[in-house]
């Protein structure tokens, strides 16, 4: 560790200590009154502008160099690193849980609500899940180097496409420290270096997990800088990261709408994102109503705080009186608050939905219901209020389902299935880094292949262009 901090050995011991606290960063020159001032990270909560910029630039430069090493690594080496990280996490779980306990206490002291504390908390079961996730990613097919679409041209050359890493991926996320492992594992397997910026509420957990990741990488001879966790909680670090066009190739934000909106507006680096998940299920007048009931219940009540949960139910007028009372009774039994259009309120007892309701991703046991004349009105509603995430139609009419698939402009469009299936694991991707509602590069659940690109490769036999 001392060799990492050689440039500041002329400074006081306290400054040497705080420089060591920020892994691989050498030039912090702030001073403190006592050692108590630098315990548990306050010294790296915020830096002056010059220190912050230098720190972030160094992370970026190290990631760019490391990206070449991981891009050239064999599948065997990457898998060995993933398994070594899993072993390090298992061997150091006591340290990880201790760090998380510190974050949890800080969260309670700072008034975090129960939902945020739940996302923040780690326990043995969640650590086990992180370990199992690493092992599962190690078992996934490696997309890097795969050559496809090989074709011989009239000139005699053969052209094809080779799948390659994106390079350096910056990932910004909130609350859940397990994302540190998920993101690191997917980026590593897809041949990318990554810079991770977790939420300030999880800083000690993320530091402990990052230490396990470094140990796993080092044990397989890979640079520790393939995965770097930003160890300062200053929000200005995010502003630096999303503008580092020389060293970061893509940003993936995972968090609340305000975070993603800020990054989308301020980033100079390309962003893979979705703002929110206002997902719809439309029950057609030619639906199997038993199937429709099961899908509508599952899409809303399987889990509430996820982006692929249904937030608005659209029901064809011809079947509304038959299915809505049964659905309303079942939803209320599960504690779901219903809000409806005028026609809905005439069929079931519920408060009227407002214009804002149609625009809202509740992430809660609340559901808006609208009765529509037909599928065309349903698609018009989705086009106006949807977020291009996931929509589903329940119908037995093949022509209508074909139109719905073709005309609804969302990243996932379904027929006779719950929106809860809009998930990388369920799609056979093995795991996902997030969901994109954009139309360029990746769309829908983003797995290993979404963290890659393709380049043209040409095989010749001495041909020259005539």
Image: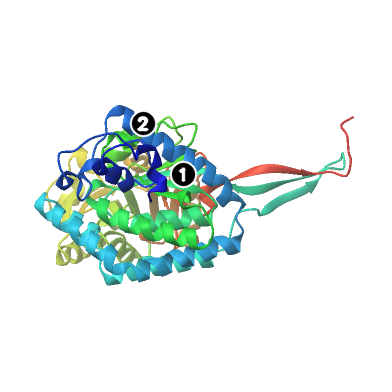
Give left or right: position of 213 versus 370: right
Disc 2 from disc 1: Cα separation: 18 Å
Above or below 431: residue 434: above
Q: Which residue is mark 1?
A: 169
What is the crowding at mark 2: few (fewer than 14 residues within 10 Å), some, or many (at least 20)? some
Query: Residue 217 versus residue 202: which sits nearer the camera?
Result: 217
Q: Position of residue 21 (x, y in %)?
A: 30, 47
- Residue shown at the point (27%, 47%) measured from the top left: 199
Give left or right: position of 261 versus 57: left
- Residue shown at the point (38%, 36%) measured from the top left: 56
Q: Quadrant of residue 8?
A: top left
Query: Residue 201 versus residue 466: which sits nearer the camera?
Result: 201
Q: Which residue is mark 2?
A: 53
Query: Residue 132 versus residue 383: which sits nearer the camera?
Result: 132
Give left or right: position of 36 versus 384: left
The disc at residue 132 is: none
Q: Position of residue 162 (x, y in %)?
A: 67, 48
Q: Quadrant of residue 408?
A: top left
- In this view of the protein, can residue 266 be seen by the observer? yes
Q: Position of residue 416 (x, y in %)?
A: 41, 61
Q: Position of residue 349 (x, y in %)?
A: 12, 55
- Residue shown at the point (15%, 39%) measured from the top left: 33
Circles 2 and 1: CB atoms closer than 8 Å: no
- In this view of the protein, can residue 283 be seen by the observer? no
Q: Secondary structure at mark 1?
A: strand
């Amino acid at each position: 560790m001392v060799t990492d901090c050689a440039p500041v050995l002329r400074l006081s011991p306290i400054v040497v200590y705080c420089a060591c606290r920020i892994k691989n960063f050498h030039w912090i020159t702030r001073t403190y009154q006592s050692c108590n001032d630098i315990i548990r990270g306050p010294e790296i909560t915020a830096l002056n502008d010059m220190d912050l910029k230098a720190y972030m630039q160094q992370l970026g430069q190290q990631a760019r160099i490391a990206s070449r090493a991981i891009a050239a690594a064999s599948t065997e080496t990457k898998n060995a690193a993933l398994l070594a990280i899993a072993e390090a996490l298992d061997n150091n779980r006591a340290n990880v849980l201790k760090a998380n306990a510190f974050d949890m206490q800080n969260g309670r002291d700072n008034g975090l609500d129960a939902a945020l504390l739940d996302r923040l908390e780690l326990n043995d079961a969640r650590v086990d899940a992180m370990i199992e996730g690493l092992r599962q990613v190690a078992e996934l097919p490696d997309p890097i180097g795969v050559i496809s679409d090989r074709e011989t041209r009239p000139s005699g050359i053969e052209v094809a496409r080779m799948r390659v890493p994106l390079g350096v991926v910056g990932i910004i996320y909130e609350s859940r420290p397990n994302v540190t492992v998920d993101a690191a594992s997917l980026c590593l397997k897809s041949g990318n270096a990554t810079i991770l910026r977790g939420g300030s509420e999880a800083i000690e957990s993320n530091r402990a997990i990052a230490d396990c990741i470094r140990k796993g990488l080092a044990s397989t001879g890979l640079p520790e800088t393939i995965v770097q966790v930003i160890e300062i909680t200053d929000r200005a670090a995010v502003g630096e990261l999303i503008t580092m066009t020389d060293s970061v190739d893509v940003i993936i934000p995972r968090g609340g709408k305000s975070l993603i909106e800020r990054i989308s507006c301020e980033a100079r680096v390309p962003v893979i994102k979705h703002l929110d998940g206002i997902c719809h299920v439309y029950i057609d007048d030619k639906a199997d109503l038993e199937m429709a009931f099961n899908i509508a219940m599952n899409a809303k009540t399987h889990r509430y705080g996820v982006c692929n949960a249904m937030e608005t139910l659209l029901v064809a007028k011809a079947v509304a009186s038959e299915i809505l009372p049964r659905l309303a009774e079942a939803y209320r039994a599960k504690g779901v608050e219903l809000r409806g259009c005028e026609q809905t309120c005439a069929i079931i007892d519920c408060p009227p939905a407002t214009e804002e309701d149609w625009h809202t991703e509740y992430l809660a046991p609340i559901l808006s219901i609208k009765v529509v004349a037909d599928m065309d009105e349903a698609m018009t509603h989705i086009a106006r209020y949807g977020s291009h995430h996931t929509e589903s139609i329940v119908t037995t009419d093949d022509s209508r389902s074909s139109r719905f698939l073709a005309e609804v402009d969302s990243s996932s469009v379904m027929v006779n299935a719950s929106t809860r299936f809009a998930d990388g694991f369920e799609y056979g991707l093995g795991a996902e880094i997030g969901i994109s509602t954009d139309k360029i590069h990746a769309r829908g659940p983003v797995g290993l292949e979404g963290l890659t690109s393709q380049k043209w490769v040409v095989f010749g036999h001495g041909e020259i262009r005539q």
